[in-house]
Image: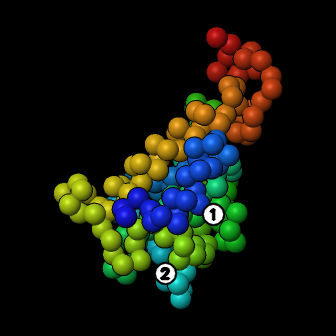
Amino acid sequence: DHFGNDEQKGRLLPGVVSGDAVLSAGLIEPMNEEPAAPNTTAVQDGSDWLLRGTKTCVPFANRASRILVSAKHESGVGVYLLDPEADGVTLARQESTSGEPQFEVTLSDARVTGDDVLVGSRSLCMRNSFPGDGCATTALIPSACASDITFTLDVPWPLAMDGTRSDSSLDSCPWGST
């Protein structure tokens, strides 16, 4: 299935629906905003993949259960469900004008298990879905939307500047009081 196999859906979607899990997406790279043509690379290591590269403006990476990452490999582009706490993953807070917690995610041989490959191990490009477009964009859109829904359901307003829940009044909101 283009949007995850039954095991992946069973493992990830219940937490997203309940608000216990957050999914995010690493779509943008320095000097490259086209997720279908990433500079990030994936090298197969047995049934696992090692990811190398940098993704920027990744929302709520510090709270995510998984980050969808597009990466090129020897026969195309894949989409990988990255554990942000895996070895080889570094999160650096980025300032955003909205105050939304965004991060630069640096991948240094970050291991993704074969169970967390969404698209890519067999060059599963969905060229027919959006002619002329790459496979990464097609696979990422539904999950990015699910991520936004999770934030809406899971996070009471306002957020603290580090992305954690805040019990303070709206007067402490970084955008000012309403």
The percent position of residue 117, horizontal first and vertical second, equals 49, 70
The residue lying at 63 percent from left, 63 percent from top is 83
Residue type at mark 2?
Answer: Val
User: Of the numbered discs in the image, which one, if any, rests on residue 14?
Assistant: none
Tag 1 and tag 2, C-beta contact below 8 Å = no
Kindly give the residue lying farthest to the right in the view shown. 167
Q: In this orientation, does residue 35 appear?
A: no
Kindly give the residue lying farthest to the bottom in the view shown. 46
Location of mark 1 (residue): 83
Q: Quadrant of residue 100?
A: top right
Q: Quadrant of residue 99?
A: top right
Foreground mark, 1 or 2?
1
The percent position of residue 30, horizontal first and vertical second, equals 48, 56
The percent position of residue 5, horizontal first and vertical second, equals 45, 65
Question: Disc 2 on helix, strand or loop?
Answer: strand
> Would you call the spot at circle 1 few (<14 residues within 10 Å), some (14-19), or many (20 or more)?
some
Question: Disc 1 on helix, strand or loop?
Answer: loop
> Would you call the spot at circle 2 few (<14 residues within 10 Å), some (14-19), or many (20 or more)?
some
Q: Nearer the viewer, residue 5 or 124?
A: 5
Q: In this orientation, does residue 74 appear?
A: yes
The residue lying at 20 percent from left, 60 percent from top is 128
The percent position of residue 138, horizontal first and vertical second, equals 33, 55
Image height check: is 60 above or below 156? Answer: below
Q: Nearer the viewer, residue 8 or 131?
A: 8
Residue type at mark 1?
Answer: Asp
Counting residues from the start of the chain, the first of labels 1 and 2 encountered is: 2
Q: Nearer the viewer, residue 98 or 167?
A: 167
Location of mark 2 (residue): 43
Q: Is residue 62 left or right of residue 109?
A: right
The residue lying at 66 percent from left, 71 percent from top is 88
Kindly give the residue lying farthest to the top in the view shown. 178
